[in-house]
Image (cartoon, rainbow, N blue to C red):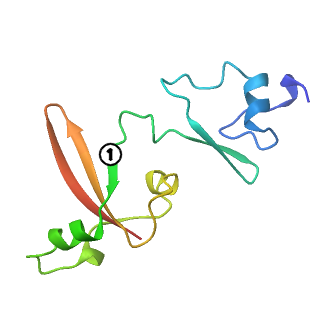
Amino acid sequence: MKKEDIFIREFVPSLSPTEFKKLFPDKVPQVKSTPQIFQSGFQIVPNYTLSNIYVPEHRKLSEAEIEELFENKDFDKEQLPKIKIHDPQVKYNTGFKKGDVLEITRIRDNSSFVTYRYVK
């Protein structure tokens, strides 16, 4: 396979990650840490959620923390805003599954705020 014969788009279906790096070293993104690369079927899917500074921190709450959070509330975790199981932060983090409650910490300027999402 020649370099000229390949049409580059978002995914290169016929190459493994190693072959892609050898043929196109200039197309591999330069980040501080090496991104994890998942080969799903025939698609190369880089995981940039771990090293991207614009992705807020996601943390799974324990059962005790969930009980404490809803102790004096008149709604339960299923009524929280939803985050889909296909969201990249949920999909590539092996610790998250359906039914979990995530604490999302967003940092803006000198302040931060916390939101909660139910994994659907």
Secondary structure under the numbered disc 1 in the rendered image = strand
Q: Is residue 11 left or right of residue 86?
A: right
Residue at the location (79% across, 31% down)?
19
Residue 73 figure quarter: bottom left
Q: Does residue 29 sit above or below 90 in this rendering?
A: above
Pick the quarter of the image with the N terminus: top right
Q: Which residue is mark 1?
A: 57
Outermost left residue: 72
Q: Residues within 10 Å of mark 1 (few under 14, many from 20)?
A: some
Q: Position of residue 85 (x, y in %)?
A: 47, 64
Q: Does residue 43 sit above or below 110 in this rendering?
A: below
Pick the quarter of the image with the C terminus: bottom left
Residue at the location (17% across, 31% down)?
109
Q: Callout 1, which amino acid?
A: Glu
Q: Is residue 119 left or right of residue 4?
A: left
Residue at the location (36% across, 33% down)?
53
Residue 23 figure quarter: top right
Outermost top residue: 26
Q: Is residue 64 left or right of residue 100?
A: left
Q: Position of residue 105 (x, y in %)?
A: 25, 47
Q: Position of residue 30 (x, y in %)?
A: 55, 22
How many numbered discs, if any? 1
Residue at the location (48% across, 23% down)?
32
Outermost front residue: 64
Q: Position of residue 41 (x, y in %)?
A: 74, 54
Q: Does residue 9 sit above or below 100 in this rendering?
A: above
Nearest the viewer among 24 and 98 is 98
